[in-house]
Image (tube, rainbow, N blue to C red):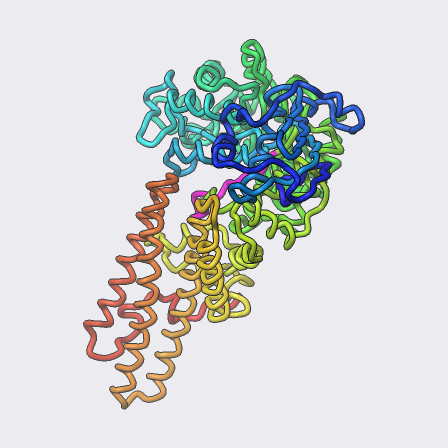
Amino acid sequence: MLMLPMPRFQNLQAGQGPVVTPRLREAVNPGEPPPLEVVCREDLSWLASHACPPACRDQAYRLELDSRTIVLSAADETGWRHGLATLAQLIEQTSDHARLPGGTIEDYPQLPWRGLQYDIARGMTYRHEHLKQVVRDMASMKLNLLHLYLEGRFAYPSHPELHQPGLMTPDEARDLTAFARAHGVTLVPQVNGLGHMAQILAPPEHAHLREDPADPYMICPSNPAALPFVLELVDDLADCFATPFLHIGMDEVAKLGHCPACKQRLEKDGHAGGPIADHINAIAAHLRQRGIRSMVWGDMLLDLAQFPGTHAANGGVTGWGSRNGTARALGLLDRDIVICDWQYARFSPAEHRFLREQGFDIMPALDTDERVCPWGPDRGLDEHIPAFFESCRQSGALGGYACTWSLKLGEVFDNRWIDFAKAAECMWTGGRLDPEPFARRFAAVFLGVEEPLLRRIDQIIKTDVVPPVVHLLSRIMKLDAPWAAIEAPPGHAEPKPNASSLIALKEEGLLWLNRLREQTRRRPHWLAWQDIPLDIDRLVLHMFALRSVVRTAYAYAGSQPDNPLVARWCRDSIRTALAGLIELTETLHNRFAALFDQLGNDADNLTKTSRFLDHLRELDAALENADTLPAPETWCPSALYQKKAEG
């Protein structure tokens, strides 16, 4: 039978196990006590013959299935929980009153901590029930850490001036923590302690804490009021989340040295490492007193000159790790701090080894924004994910996790489960991935679908429309530049092979998606929003198509200036193309409304699509009210009829 993650050792024979009863099916659920039909034993003697990492022994389990009984052996409930997750997968694939396979499964992970990161900070509205569903889904694939990127999207009790609608509340945090613990998932909240603090430092009463008084992005570590302020936020999270880790950010510190005190410190030390290390160490020492380890991003602590094969060193595009010597902070940090070395396009195993040699525990984080990030993985996630987590294993990392940062751009967390499953497989079992068989196994285990549709749909969704795809949605919907997507930089201005071919491809994706939805027997919510990225791309491509229609229409009308019928035909042709674009935008607007209600995705998407609809309808009205084809400059955006000057 198919399982995911694939167990390390199995010897199963079809139809030789116990009968699946409705009661057994109902009882084997993540977060529930083991059913009476399963005998749970505290026994790890069987593990002696395996090379299980010592830190993973408590997660190891053994399943024995004979014709009547199911015996689950593990150290405690942690291992039992993983064994039950595997048993649940077997039961899901077995009809009522049929027999499970008989035999033995012996299994354990290669990394102790295996997680996901959820960006609920940027434009998101917190949806409690959706986060509970995320926890359930994580437990089903044996993921055990959920990093909540909060920034200012938490109702910090110590700072009610930061409260606004849609924040995660302390009561919700406590409830989600308990719910996650019952499912074997640990929550790790994050508040940024240096950069990325704009949501927190935006109120005028906090302006005195800023490194640059005109910019709320960064707090000033030299300000004596800064550390007490950050510790209040940290304590709020520690009070509400029962967690062994708390993430305090520290990435992309782009303005350190702006304030006179920081500038003087930099000039004295000759680098920016001291202020960063002092700030981090002070927060870490405070949390240590509460039994909590601090986690920080690693990009400011590494120098690209030392690791040219990597990407996120020095904060990616900011380059500050080399530019002002923030990497010198690494040698000054307390070794109790866990470094989360995160990566975009590529990574360097030498980076992981270096951090471990410096005495740090690491929990590297991999970006999975293959579709919308301009710095997405060079060789695709199917190559990137296995190598990344193999490096984690070989370097002796505490664990690793997969990140997503692009939800503000029309992406949907629940659309990413196939990539999350790749990470779960590689963090648990390891090894390379063969994309087609993996997609079939994922669909069979978690969706109950046998037909090989998922891989094709995933490929179509990830086919670029206009590289880089990032920011297309937000750019399209801006009233001051609604046609920016078709005025992309040189080399990216035209879709390849062409808009018509790509429209047909995206529409093919919708066909196969509809078929997959018809066949799905389990977890349909993983497919509920897959049409959104396809419709976003279709919208962009229809904008290119409209431009082609406009230019062709004016060229044809200009070739027959004395024929008013030709001019009206051309006008009507443009209106037909506009009608298709309006219909697509209306569809996307309605989907965004449903997405906001259910998952809390960016409400700005609704505003942008609404304004873009108004803009398109104004264009259509201008043509409708004209007796013939009007001069383009009287109604039409220049991007649609003027060719951009070369050079």
Residue 334, visible in the rendered structure: yes
Q: Is 45 or 423 nearer to us in this picture?
A: 45
Residue at the farthest top position: 289
Q: Which residues are magenta?
A: 401-411
- Residue 463 place in picture, x, y as percent: 54, 59
- Residue 264 place in picture, x, y as percent: 57, 21
Residue at the farthest right position: 49
In the picture, residue 486 is in which quadrant?
bottom left
- The structure residue drawn at horizontal position 70% and vertical position 40%, both measured from the top left corner, is 12
Residue 325, visible in the rendered structure: no
- The correct choice, above or below, for 149 with respect to 514 in the image is above
Q: Would you say 121 lies left or right of 113 here?
A: left
Q: Would you say 618 lies left or right of 203 here?
A: left
- Residue 282 place in picture, x, y as percent: 56, 14
In the picture, residue 71 is in which quadrant?
top right
- The structure residue drawn at horizontal position 39% and vertical position 24%, both measured from the top left corner, is 172
Q: Is residue 135 magenta?
A: no
Q: Is 364 or 504 nearer to us in this picture?
A: 504
Q: Would you say 297 lies left or right of 57 here?
A: left
Quadrant (top left/top right/bottom left/bottom right) for the N terminus: top right
Q: Is 302 or 188 nearer to us in this picture?
A: 188
Picture mark count: 0
Q: Is 186 or 272 nearer to us in this picture?
A: 186
- Residue 262 place in picture, x, y as percent: 54, 23
- The correct choice, above or below, for 15 with respect to 173 in the image is below
